[in-house]
Amino acid sequence: MTVALIIYITLQLPLFSSTANFSEPQDKFSILKKETEAYFATLPSNIREDSELLVPDLIRKYGYPCENHTVVTPDGYILEMHRIPHGRKSFPDKRSVIYLQHGILASSADWVLPGPRKGFAYILADFGYDVWMSNVRGTRYSRKHTYLDPEKDSLEFWNFSWHEIGVIDVPIMIDYIINKTNENKLFYIGHSQGATVFYVMCSEKPQYNDKIKAMFSLAPIAFLKHMISPLLLIVAEFRTEILALYNVLNTYNFLPRNEFLAQLGDTLCNDNSTFQILCTNALFAICGFNEKQMNSSLLPIIMGHTPSGASVKQICHFAQGVKSGKFQRWDYGWVSNLDYYGDTSPPNYNLRNIYAPVYLFYSKNDWLVHELDVMKLHTELFNSIAVQVFDDHFNHMDYLYAINAPDLIYQRTIDIMKHYN
């Protein structure tokens, strides 16, 4: 996300210069594009292929079965899920179901990019679980609608935050999975915003607690009062201006996947690039520094799949939480709040409605999820256990890509799940 944002802004700078020759930026852009494509073609074939393949094809490449499933929400969004029903050596008999929910600007790719024996989805499948990976509205694989076009109908299509994802997308996907597998309950694993939308779902629709065996929150975002990530602090400070800018531009999509930017990121961030250190440091500046756990060779593959798109409203909803210190619904401003909520302030999510078992995995070096905010969430939840990661340098993205994530996170999660089976 961070690297792509920096690249995008850098490329756009000449366009905002009052003295620029308006034919020049396009020429430079075209030259850079050709040079990037040429260099991209020289990357090791395996890295290049993994960065280009769609998730189902990537999974099948490594010998795992994969199914595509589609659900349509009541408000018309067409959501795509990816299923690994069993591991490479597993027989497809009846097994416990796991629902994996990605974070913001991400997709189902998050769970498989590190490859077999490293990617969480592969590990779970090899342990005998039936793994379902969601893709929420607005992401690369769920950017379709029954009657709205994401470009032509930008305002209507992108008029959602993570609230709608929590009360509409996640419940309908869980219902589909339960119906398809004939299971009464499933395990839920969510990273970052993937945890946020679970809290929204079970707060607003408490009946979904009964469909969850246990929920595992990896870097859980609810309260953001003590968050120290510089980028989100800036967004929080200028959230009103950001919304106004996107209104003027009449576009409400934030960082969709772009083929050229993906290739440019691959070029700048690969092992042979002198700019790779800038890529890692840009990521660390957002999530927290942890060089020891960073597999830099994975960066080109990550850049091929991330960012995957989100709405501007999603970003700004988190920004509102930074300023308010509360976990609450979208703030329309006190006048409009009266119309929407009957009060000048948006209502808080009632976390006491959540009674499914929740495990809160947190780390002390996560710049987006502060320990104090996790402890507040822990006290608000009816049935939760806080689990500290045994690495004081573990950051926000390490839950997905860290070299030791299988030992520090995945094995502990699987050990806990065994008790529920």
Image (cartoon, rainbow, N blue to C red):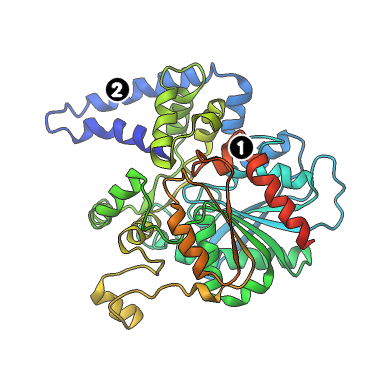
* Residue located beneath label 2 in the image: 28
Q: Residue sitting at 44 percent across and 23 percent down?
A: 276
- The alpha-carbon separation of the residues under discs 1 and 2 comes to 32 Å
Q: Residue sitting at 74 percent across and 51 percent down?
A: 415
Pick the front one: 326 or 80 = 326
Whether residue 41 is situated above or below residue 328 in the rendered picture: above
Q: Secondary structure at mark 1?
A: loop
Say which amino acid is labelled 1: Leu
Q: Nearer the viewer, mark 1 or mark 2?
A: 1
Q: Is residue 386 left or right of residue 94?
A: left
Q: State which quadrant residue 215 falls in.
A: bottom right
Q: State which quadrant residue 405 falls in.
A: top right
Say which amino acid is labelled 2: Lys
Quarter holding the N terminus? top left
Earlier residue among tags 1 and 2: 2
* Residue located beneath label 1 in the image: 113
Q: Position of residue 394 (x, y in %)?
A: 52, 40
Q: Is residue 142 left or right of residue 12?
A: right
Pick the front one: 323 or 46 = 323
Q: Which mark is residue 257?
A: none
